[in-house]
Image: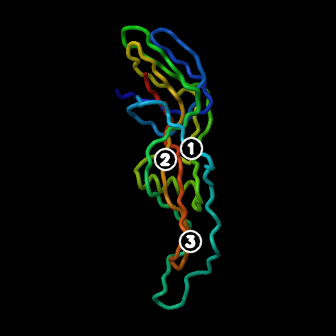
Amino acid sequence: MRTNIRKTLAVTTVAMAFLGGTSTTAFAETVSSTPIEEEILQPGPPVEEDESGFVEAPSEEAELPPFSGKPSDGPYAEYCGPPKNIYRPTANKGKSHKTVSVTQANHNGTSRTARSWFKAEAGGTVKLTYSGELKASAGVVVAELEAKYGVDLSVEVTAKVGNEVQIDTPPRKTTYGAYGVWRMHNTGTSYTLYSNCKTSAKSNVTSYTPWYVGWNLWER
């Protein structure tokens, strides 16, 4: 089943769920970015990633060495322009859901399919985080990932009130919903390219980049 999720921006929410005429109220949280139509029923709850040691990506790149102009030591001297900090993606590890809410649950105790509706009513922000030594700025990381994988990512995503989703709950099944942000899990390398075309030591970088707001929904 494909359901269109209305994306807005958020991160501290009250989520209301309605199922077969019975309503429950609970707390949930939001975030948003790219409107997307997707297969929303997941095989299970979000996997809790080990993000110990991860920090927010810098808005500015690392300081570069002094540059005094193009070298004049012969016509065959290698020259790569002024020094610059480089980030290169190496592997897309798939989507990771950053849950920012308590899990919602709706049980359909009838013999007919019922409709579940979740709606978020608060807000907050999720940012690009990484581990390793990152010399480039967060904006450069996003640009390189977008160019390589053809996706629409953000340095940070702010979520608003009003994000909602509806999904059918089969007879005598329970639908669960965890609200938050889908992020791209990626690995890459970061280094400095000097004017003589040599590079600094390359550092492996693992990052989680905000992609779009959404629910991780599953049933049992």
Question: Is the residue marked by circle 3 packed among few (<14), some (14-19), or many (20+) residues within 10 Å?
Answer: few
Circle 2 SS class: strand
Vertical position of residue 84 compared to residue 48: above or below: below
Q: Amino acid at mark 2?
A: His
Q: Amino acid at mark 3?
A: Ser
Q: Which residue is drawn at the image coordinates 44% and 9% (left, top)?
A: 109
Circle 1 SS class: loop
Q: Position of residue 98 (x, y in %)?
A: 54, 37
Q: Position of residue 201 (x, y in %)?
A: 55, 69
Q: Quadrant of residue 195?
A: bottom right
Q: Earlier in the sequence, mark 2 or mark 3?
A: 2
Q: Which mark is residue 200?
A: 3
Mark toward the viewer: 2 or 1:
1
Q: Earlier in the sequence, mark 2 or mark 1?
A: 1
Q: Which residue is drawn at the image coordinates 56% and 43% (left, top)?
A: 50
* Residue bearing mark 1: 50
Vertical position of residue 63 compared to residue 40: above or below: below
Q: CA distance from mark 3 to mark 1?
A: 29 Å
Q: Earlier in the sequence, mark 3 or mark 1?
A: 1
The C terminus: image quadrant: top left
The N terminus: image quadrant: top left
Q: Amino acid at mark 1?
A: Asp
Pick the front one: 41 or 52? 52
Question: Is the residue marked by circle 2 packed among few (<14), some (14-19), or many (20+) residues within 10 Å?
Answer: many
